[in-house]
Image (spheres, rainbow, N blue to C red):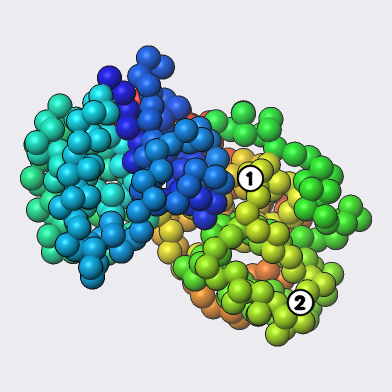
């Protein structure tokens, strides 16, 4: 018997989602082998233990049955069905709605396999989706979301229970692995002279709000010309963000080093971490920064207030002026007490204990 972890895609842009699944799987019974499927992309850059994953190498159009690929969908599903039968899997850990739409119908003929679907963010639901989940017996299917906010929203839309599995990390291990301020700044090529640095980490895609952050940072430089900005990550919006940097003459103040496998170790290079997301399922960056002892400035999203409550520092969503003012204000105060307050409210030790217990219950 084994656990089969099925991911929509591999590659560096999806590393944070893989990180969540690896944290869940770390709580599995050690006697249960774990296998991974990547429907798209490769294991390179995913992080964690996915080096020997099965790479299906399927395109998004083929997986969704678009255009010509609609004709080949029965053959694709037959391949998946055979592979599931041969997998010896008893638990299927499913990455989100896209994978669920493909694999859940197949489980009606495989009642010995129990599925756990993990929702990482808001998804566009189709009219047929609620029926998809109701087809399986309650004991064969569990839906879980990475935050209370997301779980409540999905439960209302689907009209069925969605458990909360708020992602968390072992704070002791995380802090022990984190590089010192000097080491982290050296890794990022930043000066060691105490220059104030605003950091950001995430996929370079529109919904992460980095375009707004760049514009707000450019405005903040008018009052604080000594500031620097580092955005770690990779994605489809890189060219647009680089063009923005050039147009606003920010090359000497902004760096985009791309995807870094050790990004989680580098937070102490920053004085503040910005999370300008337009929407989020949870936002692991918030947890990582707070555990590293770095205060967070985040978009005014319910899921961020769920984690930091009144200890959080918030800016209006996609509001350049609001973000610019927030950046200037953040760098006008001492960050140590703010970081301590955010750590106390987030309570990483308690969060890790709850997560571990909940993850074990899902996989048992």
Image quarter in which the C terminus is found: top left
The residue positioned 28% from the left and 60% from the top of the image is 62
133 or 227: nearer the viewer: 133
Horizontal relation, residue 10 to residue 61: left or right? right
**41 w.r.t. 243: above or below:** above
Instruction: For residue 345, say whether it is visible.
Output: no
Measuring 28% from the left and 49% from the top, which residue is drawn there? Answer: 99
- Element type where label 2 sits in the image: loop
Residue sticking out furthest to the right? 193
**Which quadrant holds residue 138?**
top left
Q: Position of residue 92 (x, y in %)?
A: 27, 34
Displayed quadrant of residue 322:
bottom right
The label on residue 250 is 2
Q: Nearer the viewer, residue 160 or 64?
A: 64
Give the CA separation, mark 1 to mark 2: 25 Å
Q: Is residue 134 left or right of residue 58?
A: left
Residue beneath disc 1: 261
Percent position (x, y) of residue 17?
A: 45, 47
């Amino acid at each position: 018997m084994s656990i089969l972890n099925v991911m929509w895609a591999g590659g560096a842009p999806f590393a944070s989602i893989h990180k969540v699944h690896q944290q869940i799987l770390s709580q599995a019974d050690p006697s249960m082998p774990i296998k991974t499927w990547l429907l798209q992309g490769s294991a390179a850059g995913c992080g964690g233990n996915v080096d020997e994953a099965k790479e299906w190498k399927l395109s998004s159009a083929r997986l969704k049955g678009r255009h010509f690929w609609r004709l080949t969908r029965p053959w694709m599903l037959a391949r998946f069905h055979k592979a599931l039968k041969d997998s010896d899997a008893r638990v299927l850990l499913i990455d989100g709605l896209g994978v669920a739409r493909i694999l859940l119908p197949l489980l009606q003929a495989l009642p010995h396999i129990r599925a756990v679907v993990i929702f990482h963010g808001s998804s566009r639901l189709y009219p047929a989706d609620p029926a998809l989940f109701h087809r399986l017996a309650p004991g064969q299917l569990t839906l879980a979301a990475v935050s209370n906010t997301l779980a409540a929203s999905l439960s209302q839309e689907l009209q069925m229970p969605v458990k909360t599995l708020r992602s968390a990390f072992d704070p002791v291990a995380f802090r022990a692995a984190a590089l010192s301020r000097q080491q982290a700044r050296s890794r990022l090529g930043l000066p060691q002279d105490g220059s104030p640095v605003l950091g950001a980490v995430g996929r370079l895609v529109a919904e992460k709000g980095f375009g707004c952050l760049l514009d707000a940072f450019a405005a903040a430089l008018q009052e604080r010309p000594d500031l620097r900005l580092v955005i770690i990550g990779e994605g489809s919006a890189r060219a647009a963000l680089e063009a923005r940097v050039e147009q606003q003459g920010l090359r000497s103040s902004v760096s985009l080093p791309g995807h870094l496998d050790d990004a989680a170790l580098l937070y102490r290079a920053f004085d503040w971490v910005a999370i300008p997301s337009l929407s989020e399922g949870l936002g692991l960056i918030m947890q990582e920064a707070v555990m590293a002892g770095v205060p967070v400035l985040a978009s005014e999203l319910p899921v961020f207030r769920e984690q930091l409550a009144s200890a959080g520092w918030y800016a209006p969503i996609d509001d350049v002026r609001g973000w610019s003012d927030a950046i200037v204000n953040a760098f006008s105060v001492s960050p140590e007490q703010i970081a301590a307050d955010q750590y106390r409210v987030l309570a990483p030790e308690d969060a890790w204990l709850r997560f571990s217990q909940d993850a074990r219950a899902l996989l048992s």
